[in-house]
Amino acid sequence: EAQVTQNPRYLITVTGKKLTVTCSQNMNHEYMSWYRQDPGLGLRQIYYSMNVEVTDKGDVPEGYKVSRKEKRNFPLILESPSPNQTSLYFCASSKRAYNEQFFGPGTRLTVL
Amino acid sequence: GENVEQHPSTLSVQEGDSAVIKCTYSDSASNYFPWYKQELGKRPQLIIDIRSNVGEKKDQRIAVTLNKTAKHFSLHITETQPEDSAVYFCAATKSNFGNEKLTFGTGTRLTIIP
């Protein structure tokens, strides 16, 4: 089954404790990206990757890191989480940005 | 960079009536405009998209129109049904290799009143 998976689905953590949210796709897509969704602000792109070892900033990259060592995986790293990073995070993959984005199920992160 | 504005933020329509959601974009080089639907507690899913070489696209009860001169595009839903209740997002991007940022609007919560 073609899908995008994210883990964990829910996470409660404390300020400053490093965390990683994993994202994996099995559709051989080149383009992967991370979004955060906040009420009234819609979906905002954090980082995107057009291929292995190629990443670029989206609209809200501050406080986040990503890596793309393999085509199927695109983890999101928060080195020192802060409460303003409490949000719903979606990973997505597609052939390119101008093709249908396939979203993962979302990760709800709470930073205390 | 690209800026996408979406209006209205909330919209309520009687079942059977039409709904229209509008988006404007700032980058005249943008050439791909998708619309995503997000049901409560679910992930966004593509419902329709349009590329800059056409002015209108229809798929059953939904249609999207694009005005490149005015830099705006709209989603039209006719004969609305309860299952159309959801949050709808527009987005814009351009197919220039090396810069494929995808910018979304802030969303429209559509409620269909039975």
Image (cartoon, coloured by chain):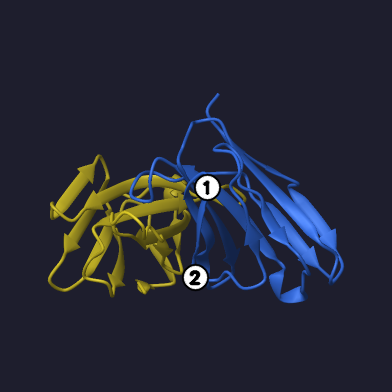
* Residue sitting farthest toward the top: A1
x then y, percent, for residue B60? 25, 39
The chain identifier of the residue carrying mark 2 reads: A
Image quadrant where residue B14 sits? bottom left
In the image, is B25 to the left or to the right of A73? left
The spot of residue B45 in percent (x, y) is 46, 45
Nearest to the observer: residue A28 or residue A36: A28
**Which of the two discs, 2 and 1, labels the residue nearer the N terminus?**
2
- Disc 1: CA contacts within 10 A as few (<14), some (14-19) or many (>=20): many
Q: Which chain is blue?
A: A
User: Residue B33 falls in which quadrant of the image?
Assistant: bottom left
Q: Residue at x 55, y 24 (%)?
A: A1
User: Residue at coordinates 62% horizontally, 44% vertically from top-left?
Assistant: A105
Q: Nearer the viewer, residue B21 or A1?
A: A1
- Cα–Cα gap, marks 2 and 1: 16 Å
Decide which of B46, B31 is in the foreground and name it: B31
Q: Residue at x 38, y 51 (%)?
A: A97
Which color is chain B depicted in?
yellow
x, y (%) of residue A50? 44, 49
Residue B18 is at least partly visible in this image:
no
**Mark 2 sits on what residue?**
A59
Q: Amino acid at mark 2?
A: Asp
Query: How many numbered circles are shown?
Result: 2
Establish if A8 lies above or below A46.
above
Name the one closer to the observer, A99 or B45.
Answer: A99
Q: Secondary structure at mark 1?
A: strand
> Mark on residue A92?
1
Looking at the rendered structure, whether the residues under marks 2 and 1 are on a common chain is answered as: yes
Tell me the SS state at disc 2: loop
